[in-house]
Structure formats: structure tokens, C-alpha cells
Amino acid sequence: MTDLTDLSSVSGDELTESQIKGILAQIDLDITNLVRDGKLSALNYAVGGQAGRTADRAGNLRALLDARTHYQQLLESAPSWNVNQFEGQKSQRQDLSS
């Protein structure tokens, strides 16, 4: 697949709550792997340096934390509905005012 030159041909639906929660879970896993020096982190790219290829772990961590903040805010800003099912019964209360 070739690289896009603009976004005019891209379309899609808004992310669902479960998709956002999945993204947050993946970011949390990537942060854990990065902190534990894991090799499964999503941001495991490296750049060339004098000592060979080195990874900017602090930069990777900052990118993951920024992404996590973004998706957490997206999750919290999504409209939500609270739906409760209530089956009301007629009250048999007596009038105590007399």
C-alpha cells in the first residue's frame, strides 16, 4: 500500500467506548513494557548514534503518556446515557394530614 499524500480519501466512524478502552489498555501495556525494558513496546524504534542504535526511552514514554491522556479525555468527553429500568407500583400511602 502506498503512502497517502492527503486525508481526502480517508473516512471512518467515530471510535466506540470499547475501542477507546482497548486503545488505553494497549497503551498501558506499552508503558509497562517500556518501563520494564521490554521488547514488545509499540514504540521500540531507535535512532543511530555514536554508540550505535539507541532508543529515546524518555521520548517514547512521553509520547505514550501524551497519547494516553488524549484517549482518556476522549473517553471522558463522550456523551453517555444512564438507562435504568424501574417498575413503579402504586403507593398505598395514607393521607396523614387529617
Image (cartoon, helix red, strand yellow):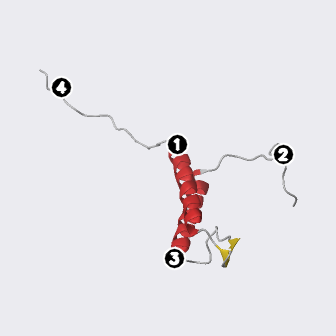
- What numbered label is drawn on residue 95? 4
N-term-proximal mark, 3 vs 1: 3
Residue in view at x 13 percent, y 22 percent: 97
Which amino acid type is shown beneath numbered disc 3?
Arg
Q: How packed is label 2: few (under 14 Cα within 10 Å), some, or many (20 or more)?
A: few
Q: Position of residue 80 (x, y in %)?
A: 51, 42
Q: For the residues carrying marks 2 and 3, which lies nearer the camera in this image?
A: 3
Q: Position of residue 14 (x, y in %)?
A: 66, 46
Q: For the residues carrying marks 4 and 2, which lies nearer the camera in this image?
A: 2
Q: Secondary structure at mark 4?
A: loop
> Which residue is the site of mark 1?
77
- What numbered label is drawn on residue 9? 2
Q: Position of residue 4 (x, y in %)?
A: 84, 52
Q: Secondary structure at mark 3?
A: loop
Which amino acid type is shown beneath numbered disc 4?
Asp
Residue contact at pointers 3 and 1, CB within 8 angstroms: no
N-term-proximal mark, 2 vs 3: 2
Q: Position of residue 37 (x, y in %)?
A: 55, 77
64 relative to 36, above or below: above
Q: Secondary structure at mark 2?
A: loop
Q: How packed is label 1: few (under 14 Cα within 10 Å), some, or many (20 or more)?
A: few
* CA–CA distance in space, label 4 to label 2: 69 Å
57 relative to 16, above or below: below
> Which residue is the site of mark 3?
36
8 relative to 44, above or below: above
* CA–CA distance in space, label 1 to label 4: 46 Å
Q: For the residues carrying marks 3 and 4, which lies nearer the camera in this image?
A: 3
Which amino acid type is shown beneath numbered disc 1?
Ser
> Quick check: can you spot residue 54?
yes
* CA–CA distance in space, label 2 to label 1: 27 Å
Give the quarter of the figure containing the C terminus: top left
